[in-house]
Image: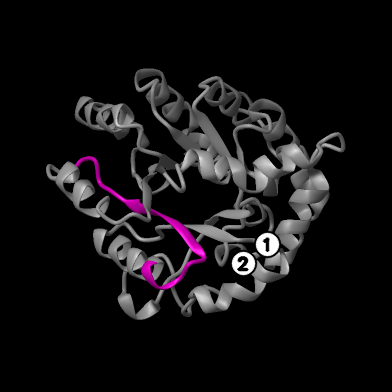
Amino acid sequence: MKIDAHQHYWTMSRSDYGWITEELPVLYRDYLPQHLEGHLRKHHIDGTILVQAAPTIEETEYLLGLADQWESIFGVVGWLDLFHPEHREQFNRLRQHQKLVGFRIMLQDMPDASAVLEPAFIEALRGYAELDIPVDLLVTADQLGVLCELLDVVPGLRGVIDHIAKPPIGQQAFEPWRSDLERAAGHSNIYCKLSGMVTEADHDTWTPEQLRPYIEHVVRIFGPDRLMFGTDWPVCLLAAGYDEVVEVLEAALPAEWGEQERAKLYGENARTFYKLGE
């Protein structure tokens, strides 16, 4: 089973997406399942993990409605505010939908990421860790230190770092991203998505060679059992088409990887992590 483990859909009329403006004309339009189907067929991808792109419960409900209509949506990663006093009630209501596979913590959008180290947040996250709920972690390279502190105090978390933690590929800088991500990888139940990389490079002048050392480092520290392939479509269109995203990753994978390792990266790890079919 082949899975794109990270992509988005949105409808601009919903007004959930404050970060998508007319200054981003490539993204400032509707993106729906019918617009992705051709790419999935071309690359023999059976289905996708649809990830929230707006910090609202309403958008998560909208995405779950799309999942009802499209078999190609294998699971939805929703949004949840662990600072909200009723977050558990909201989650219990959302999880009644069989295609809700987890939620995403958006450290990237927090004015101060260290807020996740507050006792109330830690207690809330520990509760979801005890339930073994999959959690996506949207974090930038400079927030990895905070994330590592969080993982140290919530060691049972089933988590996946989105977009390899957004290193400064455009500047070809590696530290402290390299060391901090390796520390995060030391937690055996933390995975990483090989996604969202082209948009961290210069959108107009990036080359596959600029992405390769970042991919190679992630592959080395997480290994074939804890990596997922994701395109971050349509956000990737800011810098590259769907085909290019697939080709760049494939070209940078270890030459010694065979069918078993590729099967894990391109679907089996996502199926296991998100408990698809359970």
Residue 199 pos. (x, y %):
62, 57
**Is residue 206 at least partly visible in the picture?**
no
Residue 70 within the segment the image draws in magenta: yes
Question: Coloured how?
Answer: one colour
Classed neighbour count for the residue bearing mark 1: other residues with Cα under 10 Å, few (<14), some (14–19), many (≥20): some
Which quadrant: the C terminus?
A: top left
In the foreground, 197 or 95 = 95
Label 1 with label 2: CB-CB less than 8 Å:
yes
Asked if residue 219 is positioned above or below residue 249 in the image, the reply reads above
Callout 1 secondary element: loop
Sequence-earlier tag: 1 or 2: 1
Query: Which amino acid type is shown beneath numbered disc 2?
Result: Leu
Asked if residue 155 is positioned above or below residue 139 in the image, the reply reads above
Which residue in the rendered view is the most extreme toward the right? Answer: 255
Q: Which residues are magenta?
A: 68-83
The disc label shown at residue 203, or none: 1
Say left or right for 153 vs 71: left
Residue 108 pos. (x, y %):
42, 46
Task: Give the Cα distance between marks 1 and 2.
Answer: 7 Å
Residue 28 pos. (x, y %):
48, 77
The disc label shown at residue 238, or none: 2
